[in-house]
Amino acid sequence: MSTTPPVTPPTPRRKPKPEITRIGDRQLKPATLMMGFGYDPTLSEGALKPPIFLTSTFAFPSAEEGKRFFEGITGQRPGGSEGLVYSRFNGPNQEILEDRLAVWDGAEDALVFSSGMSAIATLLLACCGQGDVIVHSGPLYAATEGFIARTLSRFGIGYVDFPAGAAPAEISAALEKGKALAAQQGGKLALVYLESPANPTNALVDVEAVAAARDAIAPEAPIAIDNTFLGPLWQRPLDHGADVVVYSLTKYAGGHSDLVAGGLSGARRWMDPIRMLRNTMGTICDPNTSWMLLRSLETLELRMTRAGENAAKVCAFLAGHPKVEGLGYLGMIADPRQQDIYARHCSGAGSTFSLFITGSEAESFRFLDTLKIAKLAVSLGGTETLASHPASMTHLSVPPERKAALGITDNLVRISVGIEDPDDLIADFAQALDAA
Ligand SMILES: *Cc1c(COP(=O)(O)O)cnc(C)c1O
């Protein structure tokens, strides 16, 4: 006769340990918090690194709690769900990543997405309805510009743009124009959308001037800014009056050219409606990519600092070279207004810049084809140095007049400097310039 083993009582559900974010009155820096913030190993068998949670759904502790969690998901209870429900809404890896991304931006909340473009599309759809108007700086990342001009326009959403380097009066005029257009269409000025620095020219937007104009003309409209080129290390737009920070995490944040993801951060007031739409559409980042991004954020400051130092050394060499006609590098700005914007908004010049080769497309192509260390590829912000030719690649479909207005010439090569040895990079650029 077999005996049933005694039933052991269940261990009580463990509570997460309180977050350590200060020592005495010292607030810990993001570089320190990236190693532990938002994750309690005791909840995952002591695993030092968070496991990757491959599950589509989550078991509720009780029916009552399941109901409460759903009240958070559906927005009947503000601030998101108190517990995990279903992986289209959220998961442990994504939540830890969101907590850590918010730390970098000094934001109340953050959301992660399957790509930079799915973050941008979800943001725009959450903010705008029929008849509304977006006022945006130009140029924008080509897919963002296309989504506004060609997709949102099909739903009666209009736009007004102004050039990235615009002076305060020009910014105010664009907002007034946007407000008037919205009134005419029976909508509102729903969003001010910026990208700074702009790609590929590195023109900077005066975010502080945009915020002042918004406060005066359209106080209800949030300001979102694509901070992919300098963030989160060298520019913190929330400190300058922006409301939502936008990232392609594919670039510097991911940093190894091995994933595609996006992020938004800002106050809960702005994140809540965007989270609701992400819940509906399923544009959330997957657990594996989120885990890789947690790995990447641990070395973000190290990688970006080294890449920035390398770019400064490479540009110092390029600036004096007879085959170089000019440089669009934020560490060497000639225009006094751009220099003033830089001084007020940025803490570093980044590692992505444009290089104007003496000559045209033929010389640029010879230069690109002769590079030995730098790879010929679009994208930026990875550990490896990349070079591309915007006029014939990323901006090929831009009409000639707009290309000319944006300064995208046939002798422009865009470089994203990585973390290699700087003297090796200089040797590579030197031999490729000789061949051009
Ligand atoms: C790459 C990029 C995007 C789009 O991001 P994906 O991750 O490729 O979807 C948006 N904005 C900027 C400035 C970018 O460089």
Image (cartoon, rainbow, N blue to C red):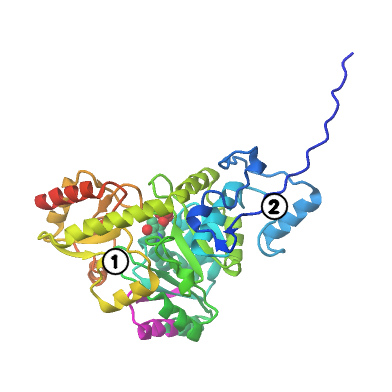
Question: Hey, which quadrant is residue 150 in on the image?
Answer: bottom left
The circle drawn on residue 353 is none
Q: Are marks 1 and 2 in contact (CB under 8 Å)?
A: no
Q: Name which residue lies at 44% across and 68% down.
A: 225
Residue 172 versus residue 434: which sits nearer the camera? Answer: 434
Q: Name which residue lies at 57% across and 51% down.
A: 96
Image position of 97 (left or right of 260): right
Q: Is residue 363 above or below residue 216?
A: above
Q: Is residue 333 visible?
A: yes
Q: Is residue 408 magenta?
A: no
Residue under pointer 1: 330
Question: Hey, which quadrant is residue 171 in on the image?
Answer: bottom left
Q: Is residue 165 magenta?
A: yes
Range of magenta residues: 157-176
Expressed as whole percent of the image width and height from the top left, the position of residue 21 reads 58, 57
SS of the residue at dot 1?
A: helix
Residue 265 versus residue 282: which sits nearer the camera? Answer: 265
Expressed as whole percent of the image width and height from the top left, the position of residue 383 reads 34, 47
Measured in 3D between alpha carbons, the distance from the residue under mark 1 to the one under mark 2, in whole angstroms, is 44 Å
Return the disc, 1 or 2, that comes first in the chain's sequence: 2
Residue lying farthest to the top in this orientation: 1
Q: Is residue 189 above or below residue 364?
A: below
Residue under pointer 2: 83
Q: Name which residue lies at 57% across and 42% down.
A: 50
